[in-house]
Image (cartoon, grey):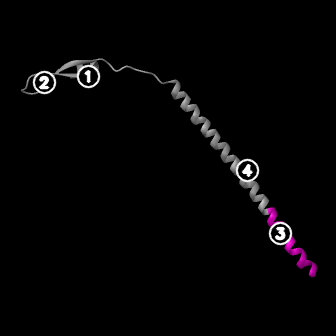
Amino acid sequence: MTTMFLIAPFAAIAVASLLTIADAAVRGWNAARNLRADADRQDSLRQIVVRFEDQVQMARMPALRPATVNAGRRQRQGARSPERLRAVA
């Protein structure tokens, strides 16, 4: 009976240690998996950014030409609008 009181605490400590080691292993595996997923996500974001940087194009604004605008009873005034909008105005 006395030996049981001596062995029981050591057995409890051993079981708790095994549970702690198993918990640490599972948490470490999950952390590694999350890091891999984050790295993959960051790689995909970098690829998207690189794709957009490759597609940057410079475009000039259309030349502005004076278009006449009717200002009611006042004198007709010249307004500046892009070439495409002149046909609509």
- Residue at label 1? 85
Give residue 29's mark: 4
- Give coordinates of residue 62: x percent, y percent: 32, 19
Q: Amino acid at mark 2?
A: Asn
Label 1, secondary structure: give it. Answer: helix
Residue ID for mark 3: 13
Q: Quadrant of residue 83?
A: top left
Q: Amino acid at mark 4?
A: Trp
> Which residue appears at 62% of the width and 36% of the height?
43
Inspect the image, locate mark 1, and give the three-letter code of the amino acid beneath it. Leu
88 versus 42 height, above or below? above
- Residue 64 is situated, as x and y percent measured from the top left of the image, at 27, 19
Q: Is residue 68 left or right of residue 22?
A: left
Q: Quadrant of the C terminus?
A: top left
How many marks can you see?
A: 4
In the figure, residue 57 lies in which quadrant? top left
- Work out whether mark 3 precedes mark 4 in sequence or the reverse, and give the earlier one: 3
Q: Residue at x 82, y 66 (%)?
A: 15
Residue that lies at the very extreme toward the bottom in this rendered image: 1
